[in-house]
Amino acid sequence: MGGLVVNCKKCNKVFQQRLHPICPDCVKLGDEQFTRLYRKLQESASYGGIAIDVLADSVGITQEAIEKYYLEGRLSTAGIYLKMSCPACGVMCGETERRGRFCLKCSDITASLAGVEVKPMQEIRRQAEVAQQHEFHDALLRKRPEDASHRFGTAVRR
């Protein structure tokens, strides 16, 4: 069964849409650009990383697209070599010197002004995993209390 005939969101070419709102040629081009970007980031490890503007110019991708890849987590281990400027103060910083898009200093200042505590990402992920395990356990208890008590070694209250 065919897809809907639409115009590509990038090049405006007419194509039969299946998964993406962009044509297969633009998907392929995007994949090639991402591969070049990722390789350039890995190469930059030998000289301490690369600034986002230099990377964008050398690969031919916008800074916004690179930031989007970073924030989506698509750069994975190569993301540590990406140096971005803090949108609040303009300081250029690597991954260990920022939280998301903001440098550590601006992140702390913003958090204190908002009256919130900033936690490291690893701690947030760990807490989410623990919460998910508790939800699973609770769901299992509701579904079949006798199985849950045996599996988790907990007493079932009736």
Image (cartoon, rainbow, N blue to C red):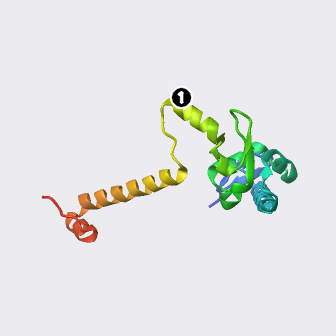
Circle 1 sits on which residue?
Answer: 113
Q: Which quarter of the figure is the N terminus placed in? A: bottom right
In the picture as drawn, the residue positioned furthest to the right comes out as 58
Residue drawn where x is 87% and y is 52% of the image: 58
Residue 156 % position (x, y):
17, 62
Q: Which quarter of the figure is the C terminus placed in? A: bottom left
Q: Is residue 7 visible?
A: no
Q: Nearer the viewer, residue 56 or 27?
A: 56
Residue 133 % position (x, y):
37, 59
Residue 132 % position (x, y):
40, 56
Q: Nearer the viewer, residue 141 or 49?
A: 49
Q: Nearer the viewer, residue 51 or 4?
A: 51
Neighbourhood count class around disc 1 (C-alpha, 10 Å): few under 14, some 14–19, many 20 upward: few
Q: Compared with residue 151, is residue 119 higher up or lower down, i.e. above or below?
A: above
In the picture as drawn, the residue positioned furthest to the left comes out as 158
Residue drawn where x is 84% and y is 53% of the image: 59
The answer to whether residue 108 is left or right of residue 83 is left
Q: Compared with residue 104, is residue 133 higher up or lower down, i.e. above or below?
A: below
Residue drawn where x is 62% and y is 45% of the image: 100
In the picture as drawn, the residue positioned furthest to the front comes out as 105
Q: Is residue 82 visible?
A: yes
| Number of numbered labels in the structure image | 1
Q: Compared with residue 59, is residue 99 higher up or lower down, i.e. above or below?
A: above
The answer to whether residue 91 is left or right of residue 60 is left
Residue 20 % position (x, y):
67, 53
> In terms of image quadrants, where is residue 62?
top right
Residue drawn where x is 27% and y is 70% of the image: 151
Q: Secondary structure at mark 1?
A: helix
In the picture as drawn, the residue positioned furthest to the bottom comes out as 150
Q: Amino acid at mark 1?
A: Leu
Q: Compared with residue 109, is residue 25 higher up or lower down, i.e. above or below?
A: below
